[in-house]
Image (cartoon, rainbow, N blue to C red):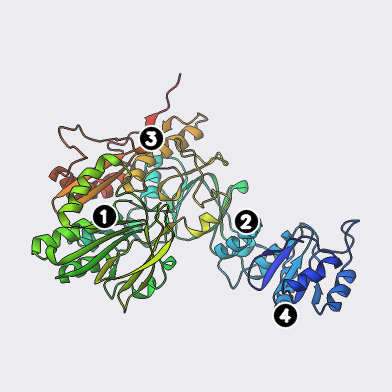
């Protein structure tokens, strides 16, 4: 017997025998549901045998048989009834446990989000993506799925999604393309660091989504619930099904605020802020202006995160503001980094270390924020220094800038598109899915080992657009992505260290060194960040203008 836990109330198992009842009782189960019809196999004990042994042990048993491969709506309802009426915890079984897991999934469809259902069953070793449409339809078999069909479907209308839609439409104007995204507003997220530093007004980083969708591209204003790659289908909330010939996945990542205990309850007050949210970045600047002394903590969670330099950007701009006001000497600035280095590409570290020294910043490596008590103004960190015993450290703060842990969106992590870590599994050069030839991905959601930045998406969009166009024309992919990403590190107001690099930390500068040496702070890089990059984003990237990002071509030998 090998029971797999799905919830505290239910575990599922392959076929059990009467001899297993003693162990079942010892494990604390109070009821059994049999989902396997009698006589399915020659070596299968009957339900009556199991029932007799269970009753003798004081365990209730219920017979809810389901024919293999034919789980009906009424079967799911009968399972739900049994779960309500029987004492828990319950052990359900069939030949492998799959029918029992399926019945539970369908029975929970009206009360639990689909991603939670798929995650719970996946953790137990059962893939329920095959019944995702029914889960999305409240556990019922869809009778009218209202399919729409497109040449290309793009999931996500962020920087990557809109850019690749525009680039692809420029290459093939007659393509029937759909963009799926439920959001009303599109944000220029790279600008939020400048908002938190008092340089930008938050309102200049937001525009209505409808005005940015490329002309001729259909906008489906809905959330994605699941994928059926074997059927070339995307399932939307409400069980609408969108079919595609080719799929591009670019929904970004999820900020996991809830992973830090107490954080959600105190964000935006008690001195707790983050430039990773539109409505909180102005609060960062408000706090910086209020501070006349005290302890300011800046955190960085484990990788991957979007824009790995953003935690430091907030810190340096805050320190510069305090320096200009003459209060820096009264500040205790602590950088709490879950990693072990200041920046992942060594060429840029000396310049950053110079500013760490200039501002009197204390570096604390291997410190990962796990808890915040806002009213008490304390933060607790898990310290995991190599070679030392892990420990918890609690420190007081007057202001804390938090960068939340970041994961793939729930509907991606539980999908057939994801790798073991939950990210879309692509070839890092072509950005084509490793298992499904008609699927590509770009932006923060995929697993190529590049920096997750808007600059990376700007480079990836033409690569994906070209390779999708090649596939439509019956050709092999002709464009390759070199891992380019850019992180303009705002080390002070008016100067930036412009980090530009690719796979393996290889430097990939956009300008000759005599014009702009990215390893050193420069006013030219600040001008680029403040004045040039916003219009390049709004008027270039999102319109398919591939300025300075023409994709590299595959070398044919």
Distance (Cα) linking label 4 and label 3 = 58 Å
Q: Which of these two is toward me, 304 or 104?
A: 304
Q: Which of these two is toward me, 372 or 153?
A: 372
CA neighbours of label 3 inside 10 A, class few (<14), some (14 to 19), many (20+): many
* Residue at the spot of label 1: 312
Q: Which callout, 2 or 1, points at the residue further toward the start of the chain?
A: 2
With 536 as the anchor, is 172 left or right in this view? right
* Residue at the spot of label 4: 87
Residue 525 in picture, x, y percent from top left: 18, 44
Circle 1 — which element?
Answer: helix
With 31 as the anchor, is 320 left or right in this view? left
Q: Residue furthest front?
A: 388
Q: Which callout, 1 or 4, points at the residue further toward the start of the chain?
A: 4
With 114 as the anchor, is 75 left or right in this view? right
Q: Is residue 263 above or below residue 165?
A: below
Residue 77's disc number: none
Residue 46 in picture, x, y percent from top left: 89, 66
Circle 2 — which element?
Answer: helix
Asked whether the residues under the numbered discs 2 and 1 touch, taking CB atoms below 8 Å apart as contact, a structural biologist would say no
Q: Which callout, 4 or 3, points at the residue further toward the start of the chain?
A: 4
* Residue at the spot of label 3: 482
Q: Which callout, 3 or 2, points at the residue further toward the start of the chain?
A: 2
Quadrant occupied by the N terminus? bottom right
Distance (Cα) linking label 3 and label 1 = 25 Å
């Amino acid at each position: 017997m090998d029971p797999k836990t799905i919830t505290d109330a239910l575990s599922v198992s392959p076929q059990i025998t009467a001899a297993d009842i003693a162990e079942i009782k010892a494990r604390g189960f109070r009821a059994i549901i049999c989902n396997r019809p009698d006589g399915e196999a020659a070596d299968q004990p009957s339900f009556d045998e199991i029932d007799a042994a269970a009753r003798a042990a004081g365990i209730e048993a219920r017979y809810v048989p389901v024919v293999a491969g034919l789980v009906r709506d009424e079967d799911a309802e009968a399972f739900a009834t049994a779960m309500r009426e029987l004492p828990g915890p319950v052990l359900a079984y069939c030949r492998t446990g799959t029918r029992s897991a399926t019945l539970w999934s369908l029975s929970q469809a009206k009360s639990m989000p689909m991603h939670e259902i798929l995650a719970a069953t996946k953790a137990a070793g059962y893939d329920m993506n095959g019944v995702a449409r029914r889960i999305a339809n409240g556990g019922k078999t869809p009778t009218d799925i209202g399919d729409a069909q497109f040449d290309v479907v793009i999931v996500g209308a962020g920087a990557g999604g809109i850019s690749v839609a525009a680039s692809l439409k420029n290459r093939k104007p007659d393509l029937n393309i759909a963009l799926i995204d439920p959001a009303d507003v599109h944000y220029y997220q790279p600008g939020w660091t400048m908002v938190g530093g008092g340089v930008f007004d938050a309102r200049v980083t937001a525009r209505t989504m409808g005005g940015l969708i490329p002309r001729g591209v259909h906008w489906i204003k809905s959330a994605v619930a699941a994928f059926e790659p074997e059927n070339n289908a995307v399932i939307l909330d409400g069980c609408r099904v969108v079919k595609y010939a080719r799929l591009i996945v670019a929904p970004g990542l999820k900020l996991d605020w809830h992973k830090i205990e107490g954080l959600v309850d105190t964000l935006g007050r008690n001195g707790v802020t983050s430039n990773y949210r539109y409505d909180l970045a102005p609060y960062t600047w408000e706090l910086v202006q209020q501070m006349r002394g005290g302890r300011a903590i800046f955190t960085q969670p484990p990788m991957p995160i979007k824009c790995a330099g953003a935690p430091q950007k907030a810190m340096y701009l805050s320190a510069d503001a305090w320096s200009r006001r003459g209060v820096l000497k009264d500040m205790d600035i602590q950088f709490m980094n879950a990693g072990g280095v200041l920046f992942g590409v060594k060429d840029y570290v000396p310049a950053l270390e110079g500013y760490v020294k200039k501002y009197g910043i204390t570096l604390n490596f291997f410190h990962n924020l796990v808890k915040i008590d806002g009213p008490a103004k304390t933060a607790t960190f898990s310290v995991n220094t190599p070679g030392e015993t892990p420990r918890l450290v609690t420190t007081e703060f007057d202001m804390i800038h938090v960068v939340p842990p970041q994961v793939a969106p729930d509907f991606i992590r539980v999908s057939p598109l994801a790798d073991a870590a939950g990210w879309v599994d692509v070839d890092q050069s072509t950005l084509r899915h490793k298992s499904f030839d008609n699927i590509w991905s770009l932006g923060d959601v995929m697993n190529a080992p590049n920096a997750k930045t808007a600059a990376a998406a700007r480079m990836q969009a033409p690569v994906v657009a070209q390779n999708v166009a090649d596939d439509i024309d019956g050709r092999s992919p002709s464009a390759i992505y070199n891992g380019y990403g850019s992180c303009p590190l705002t080390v002070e107001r008016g100067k930036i260290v412009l980090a530009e690099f690719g796979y393996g930390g290889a430097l990939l500068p956009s300008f000759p060194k005599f014009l702009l040496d990215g390893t050193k702070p420069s006013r030219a890089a600040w001008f680029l960040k403040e004045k040039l990059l916003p219009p390049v984003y709004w008027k270039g990237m999102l319109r398919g203008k591939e300025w300075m990002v023409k994709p590299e071509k595959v070398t044919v030998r």
